[in-house]
């Protein structure tokens, strides 16, 4: 029987995904003590198995300040985490399949004009000229030349490694079994092996963040989602852009190695609370849409399919900010399948909240308060 | 009527296990669906050539095993019209009580529901690569045997067989009998291993005698047999366009030999992907040096309605596969409420149990070379789909702290190609265990992910649902 280890630190973080790991890194860069607990391996869940889109285009306007901040972090990725993680500003092209889609893309360009995304609308002859590989359904699209893609399998674990190099204590394979506040500080317990005491706590547990909100009396309607993902055998390289479709559905990119990574097309199936797979109907839908979008894929082979477990709130916006009940507790979860690009900025914001009590990036829209509309006083029946 | 009873039982694999399982179900009046990747039933060891190449006799194709091969083939042929047989068909996915099946000749994929399923997916070669193994002219032992049995041709004119395991001598013998020049047999196990294992192997004297016979026959026909070797590399010709020889270390010095083809392998590994997709619980099996789906003595897996039989659940050989297939079918019948011959069931279990000691003997006689990972040079390509070297794997361990197979895969791309780790997984796990200093069971196994083998996208897009209800 091993004795329990007790660690005292400034900030405890639950969850070693890209949000938790980048918060750990940012805190260390501020000279703040950090202990991070990850139930599995850092970056092995949603952060490490997602599509790998690094995209600002198409995000709700209220996420763009955060996305712009993240864009700057991505721009100096190698110096930040020690690897480029196959990050490429290869362009993100959102496809329109109708004139209505085109109008919607134009509206988005107008709405996002303050954010300098550099969106370029492409249609008709210029579309065929620039992307002869596009299927006939596409009538045009919107290009964000500085958006791109990266390899999440490499990037997300690298954030955790960078945080560790910077002095964060990272405990992998340490599930948090108990979390409480003793009046002065948070006490986290992992099995019989580890206890962490810290005055501040970051809840970055992704789809598994719910129990912590419940523990502190602010349960939110967090649900799990499982996008279907698939990858083809390596094909001759033909496409730089990462593709999305206006209105959602499918997304697709080709990596330098030649494989095409595809996602979307419906839901996966949960195997248990932790793991999921692509559903067969979702694979079928993904396949049909992929061939329609890129007819050259018709005779390519899928070599692998997979899914992950992501946290979704009803409005598909994250919870990012302070707890409404407990001083020292900050949440950063529920990124609704779109957390990879903004994850590093969310991490920095959480570090600022710990240090300064406020963020230099507007995050009001992501407050947990939105799930607790002011109680109207009514007389009892 | 329960769902289970309403659906035909499904058997995946038509080797010795699948055929005997089907036979036991047919006898009880059931009509199983039998899905098999090959175009003719028989499995690998009793693989049948295409009808157009059938002029060679069973004795020529299967040697001592001709009567057993004939028995399995005849059992299958006799019940052919009482089963729903789907040859040339790959089960590429399983989800929610339904299999996804790619029928190769028609290029269609169908959904086959099941209530009860016998998984008899067999085995492929256990591969520990050696520098030069990706040169044209290098085959696995099983591949070399398939070429001979199925295509009626040899892999070369002057062939070296290298590695270890019973198949090493059997294939060498079959090649020499068929008229190919066998330049040498290079066995990594030592004579001392075989001597130490003899008592255990005498538990199956007839099988043991066959092994002794192959060795004696090869020796009598002037084939050079070397044991205790360490393969160093497969040598290429001047352009490195084809095999020109092999180099090995014999314990005291380096030796080379010219040849134009190499067959190599280290016994077999189970094909467990389907069991994995079905959700079967896995455990490390020290005897097999692999994580395998667990099953009880009857062949029941941890998943209700899923039964495991044959080499796909642990390498026990063709005879044991026949017994396990029949036993699993009896379990399936009993679980359906059919009265089965319990004495027969017990006898089958006893036979398989008795073989256990012999299998331990075989592992002792032909151990996986324990120092392979230590000697694998950094430039050795372990994963040929993704061109990942032993050095890259070691670097991934050292720099990124990978200590588990799926993590190693994510960070290095090993096992991310077309084979999905089916070929390179064994070697990658050995390298990982060696590099981390962890025991093999602790580095885990690659998680199964559909498709089990690559599937054309346009087929994945357009499935047809096939009713298999009675």
Image (tube, coloured by chain):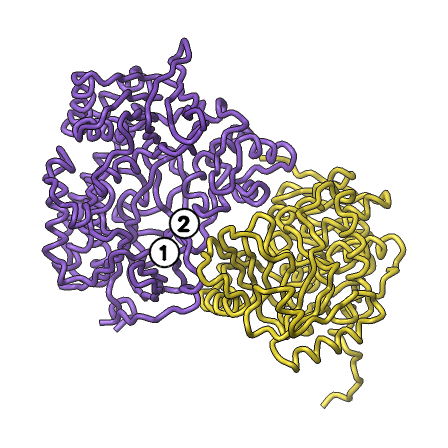
Residue B77 at x, y percent in the picture = 12, 54
Name which residue lies at 66% across and 39% down. Answer: A4
Please state if B85 lies on the left or on the right of B228 as rendered: left
Q: Quadrant of the C terminus of chain B?
A: bottom left
Question: Do the CB atoms of the residues marked 2 and 1 lie less than 8 Å apart?
Answer: yes
Q: Chain of mark 2?
A: B
Please, what secondary structure does the residue beneath circle 1 have?
loop
Return the residue at label 1.
B303
Q: Chain of mark 1?
A: B
Q: Colour of chain B?
A: purple
Tell me if I can see residue B30 in this picture: yes
Return the residue at label 2.
B281
Quarter of the image for residue A166 reads top right
Q: Colour of chain A?
A: yellow
Name which residue lies at 66% across and 82% down. Answer: A100
Q: Nearer the viewer, residue A8 or A86?
A: A86
């Amino acid at each position: 029987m091993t004795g329990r280890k007790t660690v005292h630190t400034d900030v405890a973080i639950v969850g070693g995904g890209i949000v938790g790991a980048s918060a750990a890194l940012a805190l260390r860069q501020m000279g703040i003590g950090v202990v991070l607990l990850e139930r599995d391996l850092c970056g092995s869940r949603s952060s490490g198995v997602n599509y790998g889109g690094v995209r600002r285009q198409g995000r709700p306007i209220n996420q763009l300040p955060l996305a712009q901040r993240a864009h700057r972090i991505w721009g100096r990725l190698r110096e930040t985490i020690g690897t480029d993680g196959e990050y490429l500003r290869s362009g993100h092209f959102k496809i329109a399949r109708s004139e209505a889609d085109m109008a919607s893309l134009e509206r988005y360009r107008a709405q996002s004009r303050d954010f300098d995304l550099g969106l370029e609308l492409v249609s008709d002859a210029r579309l065929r000229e620039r992307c002869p590989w596009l299927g006939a359904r596409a009538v045009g699209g919107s290009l964000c030349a500085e958006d791109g893609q990266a390899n999440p399998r490499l990037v997300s674990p690298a954030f955790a490694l960078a945080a560790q190099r910077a002095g964060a204590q990272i405990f992998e394979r340490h599930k948090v079994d108990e979390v409480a506040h003793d009046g002065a500080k948070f006490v986290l317990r992992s099995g019989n092996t580890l206890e962490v005491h810290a005055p501040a706590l970051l809840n970055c547990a992704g789809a598994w963040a719910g129990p912590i909100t419940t523990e502190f009396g602010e349960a939110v309607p967090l649900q799990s989602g499982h996008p279907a993902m698939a990858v083809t055998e390596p094909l001759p390289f033909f496409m730089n852009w990462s593709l999305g479709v206006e209105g959602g559905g499918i997304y697709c990119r080709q990596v330098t190695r030649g494989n095409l990574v595809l996602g979307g097309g419906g839901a996966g199936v949960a195997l248990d609370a932790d793991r999921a797979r692509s559903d067969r109907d979702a694979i079928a839908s993904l396949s049909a849409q992929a061939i329609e979008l890129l007819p050259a894929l018709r005779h390519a082979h899928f070599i692998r399919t997979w899914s992950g477990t992501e946290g979704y709130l009803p409005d598909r916006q994250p919870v990012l900010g302070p707890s409404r009940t407990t001083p020292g507790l900050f949440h950063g979860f529920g990124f609704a399948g779109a957390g990879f690009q903004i994850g590093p900025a969310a991490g920095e914001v959480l570090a600022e909240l710990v240090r300064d009590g406020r963020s230099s990036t507007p995050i009001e829209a992501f407050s947990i308060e939105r799930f607790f509309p002011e109680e109207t006083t009514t007389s009892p029946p | 009527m329960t769902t289970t009873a309403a659906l035909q039982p499904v058997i995946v694999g038509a080797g010795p296990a699948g055929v005997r399982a089907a036979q036991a179900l047919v006898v009880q009046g059931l009509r199983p669906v039998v899905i098999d990747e090959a175009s003719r039933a028989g499995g690998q060891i009793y693989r049948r050539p295409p009808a157009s190449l059938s002029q060679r006799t069973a004795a020529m194709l299967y040697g001592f095993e001709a009567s057993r091969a004939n028995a399995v083939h005849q059992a299958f042929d006799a019940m052919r019209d009482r089963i729903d047989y789907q040859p040339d068909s790959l089960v590429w996915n399983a989800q929610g009580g339904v299999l996804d099946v790619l029928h190769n000749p028609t290029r269609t994929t169908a959904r086959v529901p099941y209530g009860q399923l016998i998984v008899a997916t067999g085995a492929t070669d256990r591969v520990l690569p050696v520098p030069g193994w990706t040169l044209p002219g290098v085959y696995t032992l099983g591949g070399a045997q398939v070429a001979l049995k199925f295509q009626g041709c040899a892999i070369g004119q002057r062939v070296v067989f290298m590695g270890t395991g019973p198949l090493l001598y059997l294939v060498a013998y079959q090649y020499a009998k068929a008229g190919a020049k066998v330049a040498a047999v290079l066995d990594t196990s030592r004579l001392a291993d075989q001597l130490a294992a003899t008592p255990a192997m005498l538990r199956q004297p007839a099988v043991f005698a066959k092994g002794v016979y192959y060795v004696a026959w090869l020796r009598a026909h002037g084939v050079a047999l070397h044991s205790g070797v360490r393969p160093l590399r497969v040598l290429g010709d001047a352009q490195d366009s084809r095999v020109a020889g092999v180099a090995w270390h014999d314990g005291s010095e380096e030796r080379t030999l010219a040849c134009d083809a190499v067959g190599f392998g280290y016994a077999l590994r189970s094909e467990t992907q389907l069991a994995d997709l079905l959700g079967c619980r896995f455990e490390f099996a020290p005897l097999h040096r692999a994580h395998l789906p667990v099953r009880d003595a009857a062949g029941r897996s941890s998943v209700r309605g899923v039964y495991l039989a044959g080499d796909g659940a642990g390498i026990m050989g063709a005879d044991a596969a026949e017994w396990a297939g029949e036993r699993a079918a009896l379990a399936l019948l009993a679980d359906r409420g059919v009265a089965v011959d319990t004495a027969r069931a017990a006898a089958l279990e006893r036979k398989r149990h008795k073989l256990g000691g012999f299998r331990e003997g075989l592992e002792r006689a032909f151990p996986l070379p324990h120092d392979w990972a230590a000697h694998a040079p950094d430039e050795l390509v372990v994963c040929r789909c993704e061109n990942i070297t032993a050095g890259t794997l070691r670097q991934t361990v050292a720099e990124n702290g990978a200590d588990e197979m799926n993590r190693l895969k994510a960070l290095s791309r090993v096992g991310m190609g077309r084979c999905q780790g089916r070929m390179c997984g064994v070697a990658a796990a050995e390298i990982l265990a060696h590099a981390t200093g962890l025991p093999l069971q602790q580095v885990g196994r690659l998680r199964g992910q559909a498709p089990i083998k690559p599937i054309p996208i346009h087929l994945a897009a357009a499935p047809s649902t096939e009713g298999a209800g009675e």
